[in-house]
Amino acid sequence: MGLGRALVAGSGVETLIRYVGSRLLQAIPLLIGVVTLVFVILHLAPGDPTAIWFNPSIPPEVLERMRESMGLDRPLYEQYLHWLKSFLTGDFGYSYSQFRPVSEVIGDALPNTLLLGGVCLIVVFGIGMAVGAWQAVRRHTAADSMLTFVTLFLYSMPGFWLGLMLILAASTWLGWLGLPVSGMTSVDHSLLGPLDRISDIAGHLVLPTIALGLGSAAGVTRYVRGEMLEVLGQDYMRTARAKGLTERTVILRHALRNALLPVVSLLGLYLPLLFGGALVIEVVFSWPGMGRLMYDAVLARDYPLVLAASFLFAVLVIAGNLLADVLYALVDPRVRHA
Amino acid sequence: MREVRSNGGPSARRELDLLFPGLSRALAGRGTGFLLLGAWLSLLALAVYRRPRIAEFISHPTGSGLVALASLVGLLALTWIAGTRAVDPGDPSGAVPACRLRSDRRAAIGIGLLVVLGSAALLAPLLAPFDPDLIDLGAGRLLAPSASHWMGTDELGRDLFSRVLYGARVSLLIGFLAIAIAVTIGTAVGAVAGYAGGWLDALLMRTVDLFLSFPRLVLLITVVALFEPSIPLIVVVLGLTGWMGVSRLVRGQVLSVREREYVQAARAMGYGSGRILRRHVLPNVATPIIVAATLGIGNAILAEAALSYLGLGVQPPTASWGTIIQSGGDRLVDAWWITTFPGLAIVLTVMSFNLVGDGLRDALDPRRGG
């Protein structure tokens, strides 16, 4: 870890800021690359946004004028430079399909995806760490073997299918739970009081969170179990027991803390998986987030929206990776106390 | 060519092996004997039971029929060869990892499941009780699972079990081809980056970062929705979005091997970079690549299912598992079987690949024993 060494060498906070700064600088060419890649894909594909409104009653001159107004008649490199410039200045343009500024469309959808993703992340890592550690402590018992099988099963399950099965269950034999299976709010949401609104959204969150998170939670569980088993075999565990510590202290303070350290780095691995999964899950549950937006935008060939949405997905992933690295350095006492 | 061994069973048993491969081993109480004998008998039973269909495939050859026939012959031959081969109980056949793999129960179960699934996919035209595209808009619509329709029928009255069997061909084929592309690209990029170093290495690794900073599905739906969705396109795009892990693996291995004495010796003897890479570097990294590929096929199958579910994957009337799930989406409650069974098929398949991948990894890495 570059940051770890840097923190050991310099004084804490200042080094951290410098490190984050340099990582942010490295992210800029990456983001330019993302925009370029999507731009190339969009323009390699046959057809353009006007094809969606194809209608024999529209005279060709009108279509031509529409192309002109969208800048589609200009040479490719000019369009590209135009995109790049407006992106780097934070101007995402105007959505072709929703007839609103892209920033407004995304402003509506982004918080919903962050809510779903954030809740999911907490659930995934919470469950994963707890179950994985518990399994390692009870290693090679019947409960451990059964959980190993269950996590493997869940880990191999397509999230969207799990979502469909949850909808099926919630609308048949689990119907008495009254769990909402679609959307983010009930019809009468705007009439509810503030507390009821929160519980309304929380209710709508339940099924999408399970569908999106269960597979990842199983993955984290498998990983934590492996890490924990390794730590439990270390010499310092025997030392801790030998000096008379209770089993509880040995497990919680000595084993768990060391085993959970590498788990932080999993964060970077699971973020793209979560956001990618969110794309399908949002379609399954009609969740009004970035995934659904992206899906609709691609089908409508809404170039500005597709570009902006993929740009934002990349920003989220890159930011998540950076966060994971910083967290890693912060939770590792070998780095913190140096 | 059979080897006659003095410590084998009575020779009469051995002669019977020619008719019933694996019999002598089964009589000796060995599991593999029962498995081989079972496979042999069920394949023969299938061939006898489906006589009319086999005759039809021969008189009116079609692509999928010929594949099924060739697979039937091939599987029979394989079983026969394996079952009649003389066994030496003390023979440490294969390399050490192979032995350890065999003793790993998870991997054995995974490989067994994959063999069954793969054979079922190959033999689909012989196994399927109905034509998967046979439409019955009369009384045959939306039938619940029963003795004649094991998984029920869909909204066009097509037999779901037959469709899931044929869907296995599409889903598995896409998974295998996609991973072949991914491994090829990943190995090439990783080997070049690790071996060349310098600016080329930096450039290639930034490209890896670029691809990793996208959720895979976002890239997939963008490309597939803009171009016409088709199986070749899906295979290529899945391959182009799945190579990054392999390239990092290969690069790391190349870096660690590059300065070893034997590589330096090879260089001192005047061998070119290409030969050194092929003969000295890549064999070292072959096993982790196989593990990554095994786990990658599972991911590719999941991604294909998600794409098809979104309507951007395999297009009807061709059925992949994802396409069938999508077709049942509107009738989730009144025809639960359309969504449920293909999903279970996906879980079973991906789980088998994960079992084999995990088993392989543990067999190759003594540090991480289960």
Image (cartoon, coloured by chain):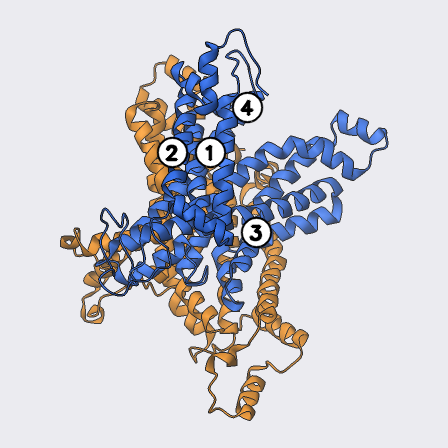
Chain colours: A orange, B blue
Q: Which residue is mark 1?
A: B356
Q: Position of residue A236 (x, y in %)?
A: 45, 19
Report whether B120 appears left or right of A22.
left
Q: Do dots 3 and 4 share one subunit?
A: yes
Q: Earlier in the sequence, mark 3 or mark 4?
A: 4
Q: Which residue is mark 3?
A: B239
- Chain name for mark 2: B
Q: Earlier in the sequence, mark 2 or mark 4?
A: 2
Q: Which residue is at 52% across, 42% downward?
A: B70
Residue B42 circle label: 2
Instruction: Assign a secondary structure to mark 2.
Output: helix
Q: Position of residue A216 (x, y in %)?
A: 39, 44
Residue B97 circle label: 4
How many residues crowd mark 1 within 10 Å: few (<14), some (14–19), many (20+)? Answer: many
Tell me the CA gap for discs 3 and 1. 21 Å
Check disc 4 and give the amino acid type.
Answer: Pro
